[in-house]
Amino acid sequence: QVQLQESGPGLVKPSETLSLTCTVSGDSMSGYYWSWIRQTPGKGLEWIGYIHYTGSTNYNPSLKSRVAISVDASKKQFSLRLTSVIAADTAVYYCARVRGKFVFDYWGQGTLVTVSS
Amino acid sequence: DIQMTQSPSSLSASVGDRVSITCQASHDISNNVNWFQQKPGRAPKLLIYDASDLEAGVPSRFRGGGSGTDFTFTISSLRSEDAATYYCQQYHTLPFTFGQGTRLEIK
């Protein structure tokens, strides 16, 4: 059974960097893309970006200047960094596995990150 | 970005009813649509991929269809546990985008 678990601070100050890690269990990271998605009451579900297990990335242009996703397949982890955060970055952040033709098949439980001083 | 417009935004139906949700894409996206179910406090759960393919382990009362710009998600015989918000998502063109969701209430 594939499981994903997000971890990281639940509170980040404005202008600082949001950092989250997703730990994968139950399967290898090989052969898949790994993605971050966030959800807010106002904007709904927003795709942030993905990383292939080989390290190639693709990001949402709306966040591209501030976001970086990295992978450490040996630890079965991938990470999200979002710089210069503002209140509008307050959201529940999900990590997800992406198989084949971009089928988001397994998701983490989500973690709430609040941007506030 | 491709906009995914879902309707209705909410609906209420009874156990045993057939319910349908539509999702319209702003551009032709072939059959590149996923459908998800989300219950409060939980992550989205994949139900349908490639517009009409049922994810393993998902009950057959859930169905998807359509191609191009118009897509439909149907629950053939509603059960109480189907109360949730349902989302469509396109993966034809980056950035991937989601519909705004349809909240389904059981009467």
Image (cartoon, coloured by chain):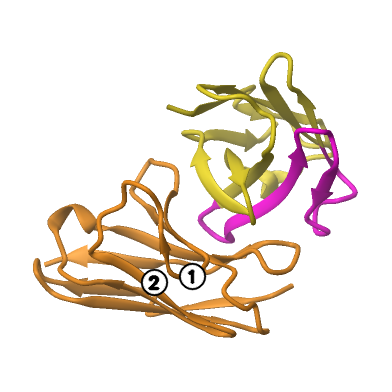
Quarter location, residue A117? top right
**Can the viewer see residue B42 in this picture?**
yes
Instruction: Name the quadrant of the N terminus of chain B.
Output: bottom right
Kindly give the residue lying farthest to the right in the view shown. Answer: A65
Q: Is residue B59 above or below residue B14?
A: above
Magenta span includes A45:
yes
Q: Which residue matches tag 2?
A: B64
Q: Which residue matches tag 1?
A: B51
Q: Is residue B107 left or right of residue A77?
A: left
Magenta span includes A72:
no
Q: Which residues are magenta?
A: A40-68
Pointer 1 local density, CA inside 10 Å: few below 14, some 14–19, many at least 20: many
For the residues beneath circles 1 and 2, the answer to whether they share a chain is yes
Pointer 2 local density, CA inside 10 Å: few below 14, some 14–19, many at least 20: many
x and y percent of residue A21 in the render?
A: 67, 24
Chain B colour is: orange
- Kindly identify which chain the residue marked by label 2 belongs to: B
Amino acid type shown at disc 2: Gly
The residue lying at 62 percent from left, 78 percent from top is B30
* Dots 1, 2 in contact, CB < 8 A: yes
x and y percent of residue B102 in the render?
A: 38, 69
The residue lying at 37 percent from left, 48 percent from top is B56
The residue lying at 42 percent from left, 77 percent from top is B65
In depth, the one of B93 and A91 nearer the eye is B93
Chain A colour is: yellow
